[in-house]
Amino acid sequence: MSELRLTPQAFSILSALIEEAAGLCYTLADKEIFESKVCARAADAGFESVLDYYYFLRYDQNARAELDALIQALVVHETFFFRELEPLRVMVERFVLPLVATGAHPRIWCAASSSGEEPLTVAMLLSDAGVFDRVDLMASDISADVLERARKGQYSPRTLRRMPIPAFAMPFMTLTEQGVSVSAKLREAVQWRKLNLTNPHDVQSVGLVDVILCRNVLIYFRDEVAYRVVDHLTQRLRPGGALLVGVSESLMRFGTALACEEHGGTFVYRKPSQP
Ligand SMILES: C[S@@+](CC[C@H](N)C(=O)[O-])C[C@H]1O[C@@H](n2cnc3c(N)ncnc32)[C@H](O)[C@@H]1O
């Protein structure tokens, strides 16, 4: 355990730096966990003072890798297979299959994919629906570590949360001594990208998509930041495209140009079909 401590002033400037870099909002209620992660990283990086660490992160030209490592240590990567499954089924049935039926090749972007359980669940559903080869699936996260884990496809038993593997997933999952592994065919079909949702250039680089999943990440941003992120995501949606957030999240709190629609019990934010 590190001997370093975070004064209220150091907490204030370091949390502001993290918010600027990744959108993550920390209040004094989070100080303890923030302090333990920041001090551990500062000590690992060889700093004897948190302020020196701050000045390094803020002003040193070679600080990018350390700032990325600190963000990786701070973000919550909690995810699991088949999480909030019903909205994913609705998304495939109501938004993807009709597009495929018109001969289109829809694009789905899973915008905060963590270690891949969410986009891989989507890939399994697409395969079950017989449209796996007719859809582009992209998954991104700010954290390079989790994307590397996703590419490898080896998961601990925890990732199933003691749920039985559903029939549609059986062909793609193998139980191993360590947990579960996911077939290479699925993992290789997903385009994995490191991307910061609060960086407009990163978001723009995705191009236009038909469906965006941005689930269980906006909660870590303050409302103004979440509003800006949603605005940039909205610009990436094709007319008629859909944005899905987590089941306990709502965009109504801060407003959006998208229309909130209910589809089979799932709330979906929709871009108008006509611009
Ligand atoms: C709690 S996980 C949610 C994973 C998945 N969407 C789900 O619902 O199970 C949140 C993810 O958002 C990512 N994240 C946090 N801030 C981000 C940002 N500014 N840009 C991109 N990803 C971010 C984290 O690295 C983490 O993997």
Image (cartoon, rainbow, N blue to C red):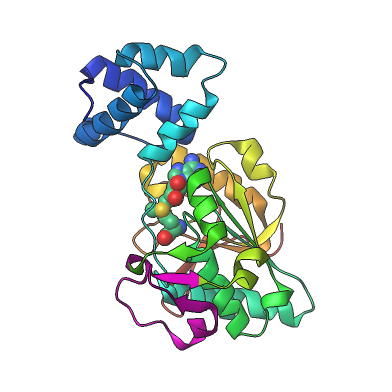
In this view, the residue in front, 36 or 254, is: 36
In the image, residue 117 lies at what x, y percent? 47, 65
In the image, residue 81 lies at what x, y percent? 42, 69
- Report the span colored magenta: 158-181
> Residue at left 38%, top 24%?
16
> Residue at left 23%, top 20%?
4
Q: Is residue 69 above or below residue 180?
A: above
In this view, the residue in front, 92 or 46, is: 46
Snapshot quadrant of residue 249:
bottom left
Quadrant containing the C terminus in the rendered view: bottom right
User: Left or right of 138: which side holds 42?
Assistant: left
> Residue at left 59%, top 49%?
233
Farthest residue, direction front? 177
Magenta region includes residue 178: yes
Q: Does residue 67 appear in this view?
A: yes
> Residue at left 62%, top 49%?
193
Q: Is residue 46 above or below residue 190?
A: above
User: Left or right of 180: which side holds 242?
Assistant: right
Magenta region includes residue 49: no
Farthest residue, direction bottom? 167
Farthest residue, direction right? 103
In the image, residue 73 lies at what x, y percent? 38, 38
